[in-house]
Amino acid sequence: MARRSSTDYDPLIMSRRIITSIDVARHAGVSQSAVSRAFSSNASISPVTRAKVFEAAAALNYRPNRIPAIMLSGRSGMIGVVVGGLSNPFYAFALECLTVSLRAAGFQIMLVHVDDALILDAALDQLASYRVDAIITALAVGTPEAARCLSELNIPAICFNSRIVGPGISTIRSNNSASGFRAARIMQECGVVRPVWLGGPVRNAASRERRRGFLGALATDNGTGKSVTELQGDDTYESGFTAVREYLRQGHRPDGLFCSNDLMACGALDAFRDHGILSCPEDVVVIGYDNIPQGAWQAYQLTTFSQNLGAFAEVAIEILTEVLSSPDVAISQKRMIDAELLVRGSTMRKAPVSR
């Protein structure tokens, strides 16, 4: 029986154990250091040798171990995408948009889930245990103390809709206040005289900004100085349904409703439908925020503001690239992106309702 050469490898046999750089070196007929250099973008190696190594690696289904490089450089090449509140379709689509864009830009991703649906603060201890080069998240920094702690981790962070920043912490925000102002103008054009604001949790900075723009516009002369009824929700469908149902049971008849997010707006629309007295948009116009897929369903046809997640992801990668190219600089940027108004049936009142 012929003896097997040291450079002959049976894929079936090799698949039974982890393939190492030594195996690749033997198969390619090169040194182990040549294999290491072949998989390092900055190392000196001839194109012919690199090609031989890659051919051998493909034949053996070899994947280089990243741990030694991480230990030597302190850089993992991983971006931590921190998510919470995935029961809200907005955060699910934000996650999808981010991961697709990051992968297309050549970044590796580590998904980190936290329990909080709004802010990053409670996840700081968890984040400290991960070796990632940067963090991108749709969650906001809740307090200056949390911002200080995050900065001390020396992990650059890019947050969506966070008013609070610090060294190494950047924020990309939707123009919430301007959108609230525009929502008020739509109410005015529709002849609304009894407007209602349905807000999210008090600690939700984006909700507070939308409220400020909405109430500020209605308080002006052009807004005819209307007083606004304020209802409180918690960003969920159920809270929107409950808040509006109870308001209607008290005998109130609003003719305009601006909701801090689409989930609550969908709940509110179902509450109007369930009550059976007010119809949308003939009796009440409704505006949401976030452009979740459900808002476009025939049952809702919700006018809303899209935060333009594609633009958020594009700016995040732009900041990320700058951050990683200057590791010794605690870069902190504030960027603003205008929301896009999507007009649907919930505000398509043919003429102001006479009162």
Image (cartoon, helix red, strand yellow):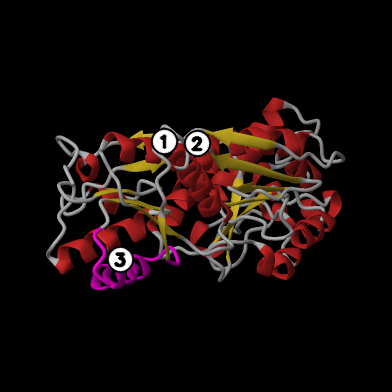
Q: Is the magenta region chiefly helix, strand or loop? A: helix
Q: Amino acid at mark 1?
A: Arg
Please state if 243 lies on the left or on the right of 22 as rendered. left
At label 3, counting other C-alpha atoms closer than 10 Å, the crowd grade (few under 14, some 14-19, many 20 or more) is many
Q: Nearer the viewer, residue 182 or 133?
A: 182
According to the picture, the residue beneath numbered tag 1 turns out to be 182
Q: Nearer the viewer, residue 38 or 139?
A: 139
Image coords of residue 181 (percent x, y): 45, 38
Q: Which residues are magenta?
A: 233-253
According to the picture, the residue beneath numbered tag 2 turns out to be 178
CA distance for labels 2 and 1: 6 Å
Please state if 237 lies on the left or on the right of 138 as rendered. left
Q: Amino acid at mark 3?
A: Val
According to the picture, the residue beneath numbered tag 3 turns out to be 244
The N terminus lies in quadrant: bottom right
Residue at the left extreme of this rendering? 276
